[in-house]
Image (cartoon, coloured by chain):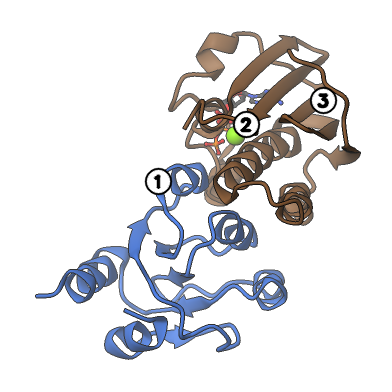
Amino acid sequence: MIENEAVLAQQFEIQGRDFNHAGNISTTIKEILQETGIPPSIIIRTAIATYEAEMNVVMYADKGTLYFSLAPDSIRIKIDDRGTGIKNISLAMKEGYSTATNEYREMGFGAGMGLPNIKKNADKFKISSCPGKGTTLEILFFLNNSEGQ
Amino acid sequence: MNLKKIKKELDLKILSSEEGLDKEVSGAYTSDLLSDVIANSKKNFLWITLQIHLNIVAVAQLKELAGIIIVNSREPDSDTLKKAEKEKCLLFSTEKTAFEISGKLYQLLKGK
Ligand SMILES: Nc1ncnc2c1ncn2[C@@H]1O[C@H](COP(=O)(O)OP(=O)(O)OP(=O)(O)O)[C@@H](O)[C@H]1O
Ligand SMILES: [Mg+2]
């Protein structure tokens, strides 16, 4: 992935199963971006991808760190978590596939659309996982063209 | 159509503060799955759901929805109400089912 000099970088800790603070990081990032004059359509795509990634850490991992950086030409989000990891990534990427528990489903999670939503909204998306250890997501948004949607 | 008119026509109860009732509604989406709402709702939509967990407020904020209609008279817990208040998210409640309220709202927004 393209690495460029960041004009802004921030890192956030995510705690597994902490549903009360879940979603706060994407809100914060949205607020930061809204002060920069980046087009609203890019901001909303970034917030959506961040939210879905954040929720997956809350639900399926013990803890994680989200790295946010803004460069002149791109927004980069990287999420590293420690948890169960994903055995079969192509299965996890399939719309409708979910291992959400009944408890999570009662809260409205488990459509199996989180990872597909990230992919759909990102300009570049990379996922890798080590079963039993954790998962890493890298999500990139370009600021200067209309690639993606 | 603005929220004030919709609230009156559908006889909705408001659970949050009334601030923002002059907001225009551009459509609606009915679903109880958060990621589905994230994928398929649009800015200034009303969201019809039976979900009451505080995550609904985050989703409404994320997608800049006009508000949330909670069906079947379900009562959100105090955390959800507090967060809605803080984030200025409009929360409504109805005793009707998702099917009934969606049908009524559809008629109202599409005329006839
Ligand atoms: N960070 C993660 N660590 C471990 N497993 C994960 C992680 N992220 C996703 N998964 C696995 O991939 C599956 C699909 O994830 P996805 O976000 O697409 O759907 P979901 O979280 O189950 O439901 P939704 O996001 O629609 O509420 C999950 O059910 C889970 O099994
Ligand atoms: Mg998910």
Residue drawn at (80%, 48%) of the image? A18
Badge 2 density bin: few <14, some 14–19, many ≥20, Cα 10 Å: few
Identify the image quadrant of residue A83. Answer: top right
Label pair 2/1, CB-CB below 8 angstroms: no
Q: Is mark 3 within 8 Å of ligand 1?
A: yes
Q: Earlier in the sequence, mark 2 or mark 3?
A: 3
Discs 1/3, front: 1
Which chain's colour is brown? A
**Residue ID for mark 1:** B40
Above or below: residue A33 compared with residue A78:
below
For mark 1, name the chain.
B
Disc sitting over residue A144 in the figure? 2
Residue at x 32%, y 64% (from the top left corner): B98
| Picture quadrant where residue B47 is located | bottom left
The letter of the blue chain is B
Measured as percent of width and height from the top left, residue B99 is found at 25, 63
From the viewer's side, name the closer residue of A63 and B84. B84
In the image, residue A79 above or below residue B6? above
Q: Secondary structure at mark 1?
A: helix
- As helix, strand or loop, the secondary structure at mark 3 comes to strand
